[in-house]
Image: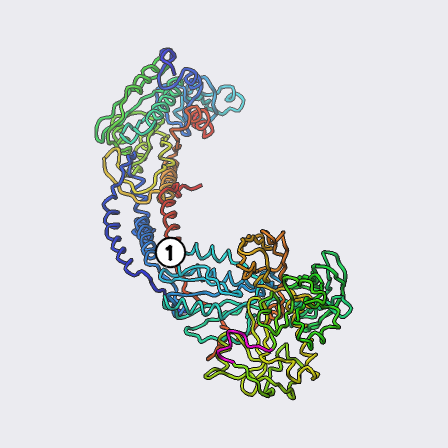
Amino acid sequence: MNYWPGFYSLPGAWYLLLLLPLVVFYFLKLKRPHKSVPSLALWSQVINDRRVNSPFQKFKRSILLLLQILLLLFLVLALMQPYIQSGAERAEYLPILIDCSASMAATDPETKESRLELAKERVTEIIDNLLPDQRVSLVAVGSTARRLTDFTDNQRILKQSLAGLTVDDVPSNLEDALRMTQALSRTVPIKTVLFYSDGNFPQEVDFDLPFELNYQMLPTAGSNVGITSFNARKNQTGNWDVFIRVENSEKNESPVTVELLQDRQSIAKEEIVLGKGDSQRLEFSISADKKSSLEAILIPGTYDSLLSDNRAFLNIPQSRSLLVFIDPDLTSYRYALGENKDLVLYPEQDGAAGPPEYDLVISSYEKNMDKQALVKLGVGFVPDDLKSYVLLEVNLTDVVDWNRSSALLRHVELGDVQITEQPVWAENAKVENLEELGYEVLIHGRLGPLLLQKRNSDGLEFYFLFNTDRSTMPYRVGFPIMVSNLIQLTLQEAGIAEVQASATPLLPTVEYVPEKKYKIKAPNGKQLSAESNKNGIVSGVAALHVGKYLISGEGAKSDEISVSLLNPLETSLVSIDEIQFSEVPVSAAQTQVDSDKPLWSEFAFVAFVLLLLEWWYFQRRPTGIPA
Amino acid sequence: MSQGTQVNQYTALFDNKTLSMLERLRLNPTRRLTNRSRGEHLSGKGGTSTEFSDYRNYVPGDDVRYIDWNIFSRLNKPFMKQYQHEEEMHVVLIIDASSSMDYEDKFLRCKQLAAAFGVMGLLNFEKVSAYSCNHKGGRPVNLSPCTGRISMKRLFDFLSSIEVGGNSPIESAVEDVLRSHRGRGVAIVLSDYESFGDLQRPFNMLFSAGLELFGVQILAPSEINPEINGDLRLVDSESGQTLDISSAGDLLGLYHEHRVLLEDHLSMLCRQRSGRFLMTNSGDTLEHVVFDLLRRKGWVR
């Protein structure tokens, strides 16, 4: 640090010329009041004696003038806006990114101070020491970046925004914040970006730094244990297996108690001890014939830094049979699914009308693909939008390759399947054309695609471009596996066989009345609003805090939707001291940001003290009277 | 004091009650400086009064009428009987009436004290004379020696009539007085003694003239405890000379030191000439000064 002060407003030194009129006026106004005394005999002796005794007589005589000169000097110095130079290059525009993800709420076991409060203190220091030509913009880094202030030197606005910053129960996304800063750098010159974080974010960030990133890592918090996963799966007996994963941070061994509540009633409790960095999956079995809500509560046995990961919520859906429509002429599929008691097959033999919506539609007619269903499987035809790219020829062919990791084709062997219909690429058609339309090729034939998958807003669609009944596929062991996979997919899409707890930062999609407004009350008391689309879907609602969200509006009937943190990285409170960017790594700074220290307030204070001193000196009672 | 009350007062200097109390007091000089004329003061020499004093051996030339024949008959040796000699003492009141005394109520106190001492002298059948000194080198206004209660009115009238003003320093005032004064006794010098001159010479002259020196310094309250501050121009009330002082508040300590030094110096000068010295504050009551202070100091009895 350079202790020689700099002056921001050096032209203020011109005000030192006021010293001349000050001295002139002082002597001009020095007209002594007359005081009549009986005799000057004593006073003459006194004056003679003082002249002998006091070598600083002249100085004492003008002490008021000296005080006035000092007062003026300090006022002018304050006006010149002096500052102690930190030695660091001074950035004119300084964006400050402040991590406000869930882990920033972790508290220190001794001071009980959260990481965010610590970051706020340090940023406040910078704001306090802002120089007149410096502008700061505050950016909150949560799951998305949020700009709190524009570039400003208004300390009141900056401090107000900083005080209003709270922790969101979400994982942090540094990349988003850096991209926002990059966008800001197009409007103002940005050399350095300050980033305050506890280091709890993915180490690798896919971003090319166009500026210098000063990563200020905050001290680590205490130990933490939390719930990182909460899901349930329906088992063969019709009961639900509930799985709760509990993880411990690297600091200390932690005894914990996990309690499971069903519809607010405690149904199970388990005590475990987690070693450093350990995780454990707990399994509970519950019976739930109807819709019910589960809540997992973790009660730590020792100090727990983070509270938001100690609760998790899960909704068990109403159990029901799958509604499946299969064309009567697709006998192989009907045969494969006929014995499954959890399904209701349509059309029924009595010819009764089916439901308006199905869970699964398997049809060889394109017109049946218009039926409302979560999963659709078209067999033996090319969809209309693909007819210009794929042609269907009668020819023998076989499977060249298939996507083995696809949910539909998992454990399915198609190597020796013979097919009598051959889809062929039209002239100049290729896979990219299909991908542009949202299709993914799952099975490749010799001259064209055999199976396509498409995900649209209504659900999942699969298209066998050949008729499977005109191949050897139904006679292979892979066929029932493929059909079983299809049923599992449908169950997943319907959400009645396996459910997973919803996590921040978004509310799960819900379906209500189309194009209506809904009010959502967040756990922190804030009111949000959302509007359903033309299909009645309400989506994209931010859920930044763990807890229950109350939705009210037409068709919602005060629905409760709960979200949990469920983020192993946030729970672990792991800190990384080096961020790996695309080109260069950025290490955490070893020292705190040392900003220039403005001194004008100190000088102004001294001037004020001098003013008081002068007033006191002028007004004081004579001090020479002996006791 | 109301108008009616003033009419009934014997003098405007103090009320009748104080006067009656003053009449019971007597001056108590240390030395017995008397004149040959008879008076009520016992002289140091053998006298001719009826009050026996002592015996002494006869020496040739003594008046045989004072031989104690009874002792001669018993011892066959002549002894002289001695009697106390009562002689008159002259009380000289020297009043500094220069301009420096015209400050607050210094001059009033000066006249009151002069009147008090004068009353004590008159009622003790002493000769009392008073001198008021205004101008340097000028002839002092004086009250010729008088004695007895009958002269009290004269004394009061004189004191009431004297004017304050002038530039007479106390040292020249004493010399002016001694130029015309004759007689031994007590010289009561009432002044503020704030003079640039040397007082040794006038005090020596008083001593040589057979006058026991009673120095009374009268200062105003604002002279004893001045409350001034800042930058001032002091103006001498007698000479009109000026003196600029800065930070007067800081000088007060030195002022007090010098005032006390002056007091000690005057006290020493008086004591060296078998005299007495007293500093009084004109802010104090007359009763306090006369009946308390002077009594305790042994000036009066």
Residue at x-position 32% and y-position 40%: A42
Q: Nearer the viewer, residue A132 or B234?
A: A132
Q: Is residue B217 left or right of residue A16?
A: right
Residue A65 in the image: state x and y as whole percent.
30, 49
Height in image: A223 above or below A35? below
Query: Looking at the magenta stretch, what is its main secondary structure?
Result: loop
User: Residue reaching furthest left?
Assistant: B138
Residue A591 in the image: state x and y as whole percent.
49, 71
In the rendered image, which quarter is residue B236 located in? top left
Region in magenta: A380-390
Residue at x-position 25% and y-position 41%: A31
Height in image: A125 above or below A280? above
Height in image: A546 above or below B65? below
Magenta residue check for A386: yes
Chain that bears disc 1: A
Height in image: B68 above or below A521? above
Q: Badge 1: how crowded within 10 Å, few (<14), some, or many (20+)?
A: many
Q: Which residue is mark 1?
A: A603
User: Residue reaching furthest right?
Assistant: A237
Q: Nearer the viewer, residue B72 or A619?
A: A619
Residue type, label 1: Phe
In the rendered image, which quarter is residue B209 located in? top left
In the rendered image, which quarter is residue B264 located in? top left
**From where the camera sits, is residue A243 visible?**
no
Q: Is residue A369 left or right of residue B221?
A: right
Label 1 secondary element: helix
Q: Nearer the viewer, residue A565 or A289?
A: A289
